[in-house]
Amino acid sequence: GRHRSRLVQPNTMKLLCLTVLGLPLAVSGQHMATSYAHYAKELHASKTRHEFDRVLRGLQGPGPGPGPDNSNGSSPSSECDTTDGDTCDNDGSTNYCDTSKLSYDMSTGKFSGSVVTNECNDQLRQYKSASASCEEQTIPSPSATNPGATPLLGRIAMTLSGGVNIYSAFEAGFNDCSTDGMPCACSGASCPGGMDVRTCEAHLDHSCTTTVDYEMFMDSCGGHAIPYHIHVDPVCNYISSDSGHSTLVGVSLDGYGIYGKFETANQRPCDLDVCHGHVGSVPVQEEYGVDKSVEVYHYHVQDTDIYPYTWTLGCYGDPDTPMDLETCKSLYDDCDDDMYTVETDDGTFEVDLYCPCFDVVQEGCDAAEM
């Protein structure tokens, strides 16, 4: 079963992670998600320093991060006002994001066009600096299908305020510092690839024989690492509109908008599918082309403290296809395939590695409403 997280303060959560941007993959849809996961498993198992250095460039100091993933609709750009490799200021002042090429179709609720970003944080970053890398992301991505699997590692969406990466809940694994070295957060315990970030931290907090390096986990805006990216509720990237519906957080690679956690004032939506989407009214945000409130399919981020869980997207949804738990699992080869027993202060339970599909848990909603 799932357990309630003891991780009360998100600024105690920072996690060093493998990013898959720039991996030499030329696959799409469900197979892209599977290939990401399998590549990460092989990479983590090999512990090859050259491979870790290539994928984790910049984690030991300033320098360019991994390059864009062309198979996912991303390509290098020269439009940013920074030079690739420039240090991103922790206060967010060096962020560059251009959404002027995006257009919004109110009949479908989808964005199309592209976003140019230098991948610097646009909010206050609470630990070491990243470095700029200018790229242009096509929206929708050629690899995204509806319904379809999201990438299990790497970019699944971007914020619209800063073009900051939004990832799934997964990391590619932590070694035991005493036996295997980096990437690691403590001695005496490890996390396999495909475990969500909060379950991993809870496990290390319970099982490590040395103090956990919490500076490797997410900051108070829900993000970390190089390039900076978000795994959980991106609380710094949305507010409540006049109707109480949260404003836009960003755009998924399938083109649908991602909104904050509220549907109305202090009320979370109670009809989300397993992808975390539903059809409903969205607030006017003229800066992004949403110039009147309409009912469209869109996603909501989650803030539940239950784990294991997925706080961004479980899959790419479709308003015409009911997305229940089994339908979601059918999109991913690893669901129900690789179970891992994990110990936390809340007990011992099993995690379905690299499976982002969960029944939605929402505060204020009973089971009959979900």
Image: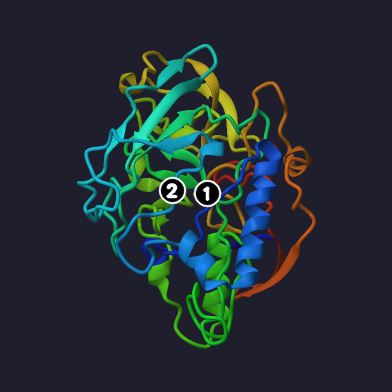
Q: Nearer the viewer, residue 209 or 151?
A: 151
Residue 150 is left or right of residue 52, and the answer is: right
Does 122 sit left or right of 39 as displayed? Answer: left
Q: CA distance from mark 1 to mark 2?
A: 12 Å
> Disc 2 marks which amino acid?
Gly
Q: Amino acid at mark 1?
A: Gly
Q: Which mark is residue 154?
A: 1
Residue at left offset 52%, top offset 72%: 49
In this rendering, is residue 203 above or below 10?
Answer: below
In percent of width and height, residue 74 lies at 47, 36
Chain-order first, disc 1 or disc 2: 2
Q: Position of residue 149 (x, y in %)?
A: 66, 39
Say how the picture is coloured: rainbow
Residue 144: where, in percent of width, then height?
60, 32
Residue 119 place in picture, x, y as percent: 35, 45
Foreground pick, 270 / 204: 204
Q: Which quadrant: the N terminus? A: bottom right
Question: SS for tag 1?
Answer: loop
The residue shown at (57%, 56%) is: 170
- State if disc 2 and disc 1 touch (CB < 8 Å): no
Quadrant housing the C terminus:
top right
Location of residue 71 with respect to 217 vertically, above or below: above
In the drawing, what numbered circle is on residue 67?
2
